[in-house]
Amino acid sequence: MEQALILVILAPSFKSETLDKIRKIPGVASAHLLYGPYDLFATINVNTREEMRAAVTKIRETEGIKSTITCNVIPQA
């Protein structure tokens, strides 16, 4: 399983629908607004790297997103 935490900075044009759109992206397990240097975080749980790439790309392409940082979770041995 592939897991990641996506940290998001929202554009000034952010609308409340942006969060709903992110939550509906396949692979997004959760998404929440934040106070602090990042405006939103999403957790992704997928089976393959290709699915991870697709989910991250969809998030980045969502209207209202200014930038993202992807933090891949290291699997425990």
Image (cartoon, rainbow, N blue to C red):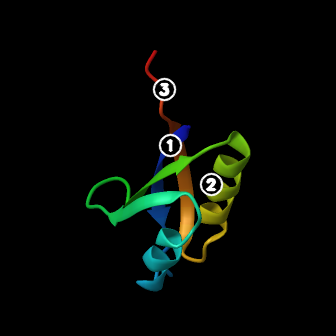
According to the image, label 2 marks what residue? Answer: 56
According to the image, label 3 marks what residue? Answer: 74
According to the image, label 1 marks what residue? Answer: 4
Q: In front here: 66 or 59?
A: 59
Q: Label 1 near label 2: C-beta < 8 Å?
A: yes
Q: Distance between the residues labelled 2 and 1?
A: 9 Å
Residue 49 x, y percent position in the rendering: 69, 41
Q: Which residue lies furthest to the right in this view?
A: 50
Q: In front here: 74 or 34?
A: 74
Earlier-in-chain disc, 3 versus 1: 1
Left or right, 39 with reference to 77: left
Category of crowding for the residue at label 1, using alpha-carbon neighbours closer than 10 angstroms: few (below 14), some (14–19), many (at least 20): some
Q: Which residue lies furthest to the left in this view?
A: 35
* Numbered tag placed on residue 40 in the rendering: none
Left or right, 60 with reference to 41: right
Residue 19 x, y percent position in the rendering: 44, 74
Q: Is residue 5 above or below residue 31?
A: above
Total numbered labels: 3
Q: Is residue 5 above or below residue 14?
A: above
